[in-house]
Image (cartoon, rainbow, N blue to C red):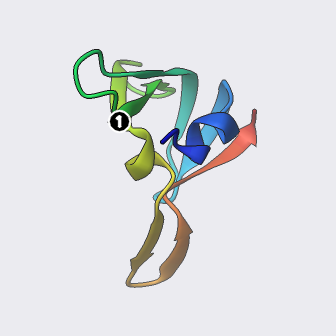
Amino acid sequence: MRCMALMLIKPGVYAHFKGRRYEVIGVGRHSETQEEFVFYRKLYGDRSYWVRPAAMFTEHIVCDDYSGPRFFAIDP
C-alpha cells in the first residue's frame, strides 16, 4: 500500500520541530523493501544530505513542550 505521506511531501524548505531548516530534494523507495524515504539536506553547517523513512519524516511528535509534526513545510 502506498504511503499517503509521499503524495504530500513536495520538494522545498521544511523546518524541523527543533527549529533547524532543511531542503527536501525528493522522495523514493528502497529497492528491496519498497519502504518510502525522504531525501533532504541540511540548510546549515556542512549542508550534508540525509535520508529518513517517510513515516518518520511525517510523524507527529509529542515531547516536553511540543506537540506537532516532526517536519513542516516553510516553502514547498
Residue at position x 69%, y 44% in the image: 73
Q: Quadrant of residue 47?
A: top left
Residue 46 lies left or right of residue 6; in this view the side is left
Point 53% across, 33% down: residue: 22
What quarter of the picture does the C terminus occupy?
top right
Q: Quadrant of residue 25?
A: top right
For the view shown, which residue lies furthest in the bottom direction?
A: 64
Q: Nearer the viewer, residue 50 or 35?
A: 35
Q: Position of residue 44 (x, y in %)?
A: 46, 28
Read off the residue under disc 1. Answer: 52
Q: Position of residue 67 (x, y in %)?
A: 52, 78
Residue type indicated by callout 1? Arg
Above or below, 32 relative to 1: above
| Picture layout, residue 39 above or below residue 63 | above
Query: Which residue appears at 52% of the width and 43% of the height?
Result: 3
Give the image location of residue 9, x and y in percent: 63, 36
Neighbour class for label 1 at 10 Å: few (<14), some, many (≥20)?
A: some
Q: Residue furthest left?
A: 32
- Apparent side of residue 11 relative to residue 21 in the rendered image (left or right): right
Q: Secondary structure at mark 1?
A: strand
**What is the x, y in percent for residue 69?**
55, 62
* Residue at the extreme front of the image, as rendered: 1
